[in-house]
Image (cartoon, coloured by chain):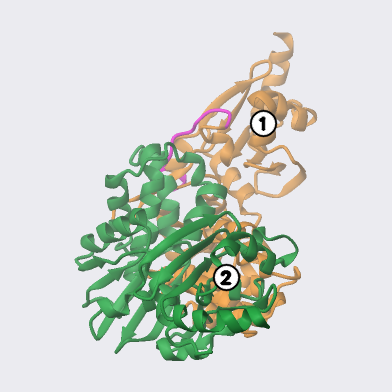
Chain colours: A orange, B green
């Protein structure tokens, strides 16, 4: 009790200045000590995704990673990503779009661990497409919150990846979004289909990539274009060393061409440099302008959410 | 020499009446003893696809399967399928479309085995789509030859499968065709993607299949529709028991909608009853008429080719 009394004022002061942001996904864990202005003071990561935490002992896992940061005044711990999924620590229900920072902050889910320690999990978002079919994101929403202040009133953001997200932002709120399985289809076709057998080399072949993007514009549909990868190889019109890049360009091209709303507008790219460079290249080929955003946006997004936490 | 002399006249007589047709694919071997009118007198099969023949000893494999049929007057041995591919017995180069029975018969590739025995391998076909991208088939061409006399002057044939073929027939010739990786994409997504993890049960759920076909008509593109399988599951809008059928309908729907030339015409279906029934159902939903052809057409096609063999 005496300790709490003496720590109390310190915590009240420091909580405004510091926080701990956790980006906790399926296969990785990343922790950041962050100042109120979003500046990262310290960071660490571990191959401790939610699928690697044995027996779902998430409290112990978190403690093992950040215990030494938890001195008095460490500030609140905010987490985002699959840690809030059904397979994670505690399910944080999806917030329906349109949703802004306040809507998401109001639905932060509190969890306790250790001796009276607390943390908050950011909820994911849901959206419905024109046909009413649902869509979900978990983790990307905090990245988007982190770049909101860099966007015009109306903007399209693309977060390329295993499950690429296309997000429409209007007036500082996430209006709607759609997910495309581009990266996962590439990975499974490469590893498990007849196409992967012809792939050679691991370097990106940009000419092959470009040819794949152009191919996406042809009639015939994706399922036909996929077989063309093999047939072009059989006819010596596509080198084995170019085939994986061609497939990548083909899939990304199909993804880009299916985003009708973003046709006339600037696209903002948010992701790893490797992927955003490829998407930027593909967008150029399809005569669309793009701007690449700082990929470390999740920390700023969590920092923004922390400002909405109730005082203690 | 004496034996040859005495067998000669018999062979000359019987060659016109009998033949041996071999459908030799990647994973299976099927042999038929066939009368001149195409009637199957005897048949047998073995799990002896070209990938299962050790050391590429195809002559021995063939001999092991049909030696007892090779009495005098057995007639010629004609083979089709992957046995004529680069990985098969001997590569029979693709014949470019448009191609009719005579064009294919002229390019029958002779192989010898055993003591002066001979056989012929039917070549595959190649085609180029509107954008000039090549396409290939190997085996399906003999099936199509086997149904030519059941078709009107102009017809679209669909051979559903791992690599579905859409074939335009004009005036008894194969004018052009396109391949769609529908079956293979279904298989790899089911076995290796995040979608497959939610699949339960193995029975076809027709309502789920129909919903998948309808979904293919929505905007957003296949890569987006694929993620919708998962999102619908997360939201309890697609039962685990229906999800595989929904994915099947989605992919078949996309395939059907990408065949622009066949829109106004009757589609002829040629394949296993299980698959053709699903395709017929999907075509009905998309307001297209279809007719199912006898799937054992390969034997009749090889029989037709045998009529073009030079006399001895």
Q: Specify the principal SS of the magenta part.
A: loop
State the residue at coordinates (27%, 59%). Answer: B282
In space, the residues marked 2 and 1 are separated at their CA atoms by 76 Å
Please tell me the numbered disc located at residue B89: none
Q: In the depicted view, which residue is nearer to us: A75 or B84? A: B84
User: For numbered disc 1, what is the local secondary structure?
Assistant: helix
For marks 2 and 1, give the one nearer the viewer. 2
Left or right of B171 in this view: B79: right
Say whether residue A146 is visible: yes
Between B84 and A91, which is closer to the camera in this rendering? B84
Q: Residue B175 colored magenta?
A: no
Task: Judge left or right: residue A275 versus residue B76.
Answer: right
Q: Is residue B262 left or right of residue A186?
A: left
Residue furthest top in the image: A1
**Quadrant of res A269:** bottom right
Query: Which image quadrant is residue A234 in?
Result: bottom right
Magenta stretch: give its range: A88-101
Which quadrant does the C terminus of chain B fall into?
Answer: bottom right
Q: Which residue is mark 1?
A: A13
The image shows residue A114 at horizontal and vertical percentages of 68, 18
Q: Is residue A110 above or below residue B189?
A: above
Left or right side of B189 for B218: left
Q: Is residue B220 above or below residue A245?
A: above
Viewer-side residue, A112 vs B56: B56
Query: Would you name the residue on which mark 2 appears?
Result: B82
């Amino acid at each position: 009790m005496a300790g709490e009394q003496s720590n109390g004022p310190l915590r009240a002061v420091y909580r405004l200045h510091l926080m701990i942001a956790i980006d906790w996904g399926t296969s990785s864990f990343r922790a950041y000590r962050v100042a109120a202005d979003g500046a990262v003071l310290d960071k660490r990561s571990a191959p401790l995704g939610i699928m690697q935490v044995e027996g779902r002992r998430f409290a112990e896992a978190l403690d093992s990673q950040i215990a030494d940061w938890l001195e008095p005044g460490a500030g609140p711990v905010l987490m985002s990503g699959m840690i809030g999924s059904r397979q994670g620590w505690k399910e944080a229900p999806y917030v329906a779009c349109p949703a802004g920072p306040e809507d998401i902050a109001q639905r932060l889910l509190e969890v306790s661990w250790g001796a009276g320690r607390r943390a908050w999990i950011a909820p994911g978002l849901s959206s419905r497409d024109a046909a009413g079919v649902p869509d979900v994101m978990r983790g990307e929403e905090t990245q988007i919150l982190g770049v909101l202040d860099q966007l015009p009133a109306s903007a399209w953001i693309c977060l390329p990846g295993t499950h690429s997200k296309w997000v429409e932002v209007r007036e500082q709120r996430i209006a709607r979004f759609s997910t495309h399985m581009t990266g996962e289809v590439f990975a499974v076709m490469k590893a498990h289909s007849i196409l992967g057998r012809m792939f050679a080399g691991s370097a990106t072949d940009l000419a092959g990539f470009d040819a794949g993007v152009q191919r996406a514009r042809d009639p015939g549909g994706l399922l036909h274009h996929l077989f063309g990868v093999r047939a072009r190889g059989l006819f010596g019109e596509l080198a084995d060393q170019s085939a994986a890049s061609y497939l990548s360009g083909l899939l990304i091209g199909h993804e880009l061409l299916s985003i009708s709303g973003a046709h006339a507008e600037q696209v903002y790219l948010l992701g790893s440099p490797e992927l955003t460079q490829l998407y930027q290249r593909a967008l150029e080929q399809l005569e669309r302008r793009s701007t690449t955003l700082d990929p470390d946006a999740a920390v700023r997004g969590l920092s923004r959410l922390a400002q909405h936490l109730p005082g203690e």
